[in-house]
Amino acid sequence: MTALLETVEHETGPRPQWCVLWLHGLGADGNDFAPIVPDLVRKDWPAIRFVFPHAPVRAVTINGGARMRAWYDITSFNIGDFDLANRADGDGVAESVAQVEALVAHEAERGIPADRLLLAGFSQGGAIALAAGLARSQPLAGLIALSTYLPMTAAQAQAALRPGANSQPLFMAHGQFDPVVPYAGGDMSAKALSGLGFDVQWHRYPMQHAVCAEEIRDLGEWMGARFAAG
């Protein structure tokens, strides 16, 4: 049985009926995106439990083997358009997907089923959100992948896709001047997921490896539509 990760939680109201599970980027922790909640939440939304887990601490090859919070090891500096998928440690990705699944199951035990849970992630966390989404046999309410990429090749993604997983709506966004995960990598990943049948809402912004106010606004509109549909 996979142990639950430590988390930071914020509930926007009593007895939340929805959950947003948000995965941070490399070297950060669950506190990184907690401050986004007041800027994101709309007055007409239902009560939501935001869950921000801390990734495990592990050695990261591209950072000289330094230990930090990471969802998987990154083994190469190469960020060329066709090499992003080979940067991720496959075993680490699988381990983190299992940890995400444990958190999804925990929310179901607390009364919020998978079809009322949004899985979000930024950068490395977004890569895990996409990998977990592909493998879902029971669809989530939606997937959110910011400034990120598919941590696998197109062929591997096709093989990992579970029946019905592509029914999950997907919000993807990327900075046009991102020096960490090149825009082309995010764009290619969005196109690959569209090719697998996902309904991808793709956004680009004039920023680097970051989140901007316009992005938060667009994401809020997309999330509001999910809550209304649910």
Image: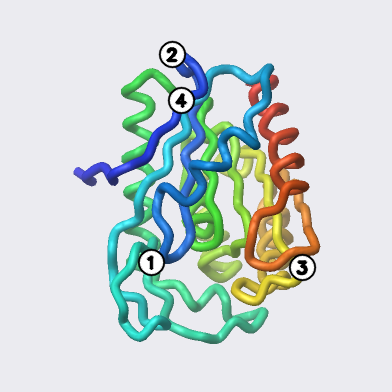
What residue sits 75% from the left and 40% below the top?
Answer: 217
Q: How far apart are marks 4 and 2 (CA)?
A: 9 Å
* Residue 131, x across and y down, in percent: 49, 55
Q: Distance between the residues labelled 2 and 1?
A: 34 Å
Give the answer, above or below, for where 183 lies relative to 139: below
Does dot 1 land on a helix, a strand or a loop? loop
Does dot 3 land on a helix, a strand or a loop? loop
Residue designated by label 2: 15
Q: The disc labelled 1 sits on which kind of residue?
A: Tyr
Q: The disc labelled 4 sits on which kind of residue?
A: Glu
Q: How far apart are marks 3 and 4 (CA)?
A: 33 Å
Residue designated by label 3: 176
Q: Distance between the residues labelled 2 and 3?
A: 39 Å
What residue sits 33% from the left and 50% below the top?
Answer: 98
Q: Compare residues 161 and 44 and report the one nearer the observer.
A: 44
Q: Which of marks 2 and 1 is nearer the N terminus?
A: 2
Dot 3: within a 10 Å radius of its alpha carbon, few (fewer than 14), some, or many (20 or more) residues?
many
Q: Is residue 114 visible?
A: no
Q: In which quarter of the image is residue 28?
A: bottom left
Residue designated by label 1: 72
* Residue 125, x across and y down, in percent: 48, 56
Q: How far apart are marks 1 and 3 (CA)?
A: 25 Å
What residue sits 43% from the left and 13% below the top?
Answer: 15
- Looking at the rendered image, the quarter that the N terminus falls into is top left
Q: Residue furthest top?
A: 15
Q: Earlier in the sequence, mark 3 or mark 4?
A: 4
Does dot 4 land on a helix, a strand or a loop? strand
- Please name which of the two marks, 3 or 4, marks the residue nearer to the observer: 4
